[in-house]
Image: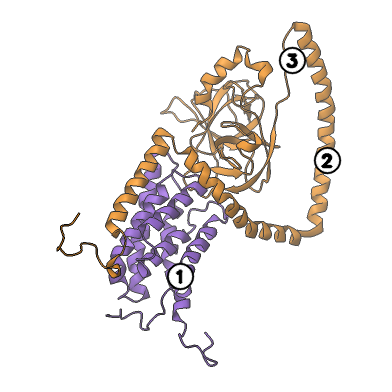
Chain colours: A purple, B orange
Amino acid sequence: MIMPRASGQLLLPANPLFVWGSIFFALMVNLVPAGRSAWMPDVVALVVVFWNVHQPRRVGVAAAFVCGVLMDVHQGALLGQHALAYTLLGYASVVLHRRLLWFGLGGQMAHVLPLFFLAQVLSTTIRMAAGGMWPAWGVVASPLIQTLLWPVAAALLLAPQRRAHDHDENRPL
Amino acid sequence: MAPPGTIDRTPPPFFRQGASARSQLALCAALAVFLMVADHRMQITQPLRATLATVLLPLQHAALWPARLLDGLGQYGAGLDESVAQNAALRRQLAAQSEAITRAARLEAENAELRALSGLRPALPPATVHAEVLFEAADRYSRKVVIDRGSVAGINLASPVIHEDGLLGQVTRVYPLSAEVTLLQDQQTSVPVLNQRTRQRGVAFGDGADDSGMELRFVAANADVQPGDELVTSGLDGVYPPGLPVARVARVERQAETSFARIELAPAASADGRRHVLVLPTKPRKADTDTPMSGGAAAANSRGGRTP
């Protein structure tokens, strides 16, 4: 198997419990009432894209869809608004997943920024068409912040797979 | 049924990967679009919403905990001085209200007597439900808060929601154990109002902006409206009871090119930092329903308040 250059190191297999647990945690983060600031990053979108890139066979487009419906109900938004955006995000990241891993973190961020941005434009367009209010211009910052969080997500979510498989006293993790 | 002797058509388990990403995309995107149409046009998704909302509710309560903790820590840090000041303010308020309450009791007795004299039906006090605001919905395209009482507690669609400063909004979605309240600042809310000073009627609309929030539309440019005028609900729509404070006129702009004045309002009640609200019943109770008012109330319902 050809190993992507950027990963640099062989990873342990992902623990499905950790994958689904991290998605659940991201949902909980989105449920925390932090006001309705327009720039608030969407952690669920970030984590869904991340796992669709790294584990496309485990977390698929359908999982993204279900997360989207839950976010719609939580926000009291138009049902299907987040679902459609996450579905397209999920599909785009499955399509990109072979290519993306050949890039370093900077290259990956350059790939996901337009994805997040297009998803934001899509949901804003849908809501405006359905009679929503124009949000503050801060919405533009939300995909940017999500992209800036990508390295953080990479560090946190891949950490369990970076542990040594034969840990001993010198390498406890 | 494959004829004998041909090769097995099912792939070995190693190649079984489930549906391809593209077919998943097609299915999920179609489902999402269907959900949108069903939600927005046909409005048949309420059972699905109610189910998911009830499932999400424990998680929402759990997610509330860190915010409440921070809040509590902040209040704890603010310390004794503030609570003493708050206590004094509340006592002053109580004293002021006790005077109003005794007067109200006297007026009520007098009113009952007058009603009996003129042969009218007795007016019943409304059955209100006390609720707590859980959180402000994070949706950027609307202004809503979620309260912790739902249809189980007897909350109906389109009920007005108030707190002590005045009208807050209207219940627009009811789940079994929670409900969504659309605030007056939302773009799709409108309230029929009465100018306290001039007794002039009008309709206040939410404009969604974070700073001002409401607008009094369709008022002639030469109408007598001044900054500082108090607007209360006029009760014309039959949804909101008359006399609830709605907003104060913040700015009046008269332009030559339009025949209407542009009037910005500052809402009397804001949802910021409010935990306790009161949900009023939608319709007048039994004793009043067969008065001529109720027919008008149903007709005005669609205009005055948004019914999803």
Q: In the displayed structure, does residue B134 sit left or right of residue B299?
A: right
Amino acid found under the numbered disc labelled 3:
Pro
Q: Nearer the viewer, residue A74 or B93?
A: A74
Packing grade of label 3 (10 A; few <14, some 14-19, many >=20) is few
Q: Secondary structure at mark 2?
A: helix
Considering only vertical position in the picture, is B211 above or below B169? below
Q: Residue at x 41, y 28 (%)?
A: B257
Amino acid bearing label 2:
Arg
Viewer-nearest of discs 2 and 1: 1
In front of the other: label 2 or label 3? 3
Image spot of residue B216 (x, y percent): 53, 30
Q: Position of residue A58 (x, y in %)?
A: 38, 65
- Pointers 3 and 1 in contact (C-beta within 8 Å): no
- Residue B92 is labelled as 2
Give the spatial CA distance, label 2 vs label 3: 33 Å
Q: Residue furthest bottom?
A: A170
Q: What residue did someone put label 3 on? A: B122
Residue to which mark 1 is pinned: A153
- Residue flagged by tag 1: what amino acid is it? Ala
Helix, strand or loop at disc 1?
helix
Considering only vertical position in the picture, is A132 above or below B192?
below
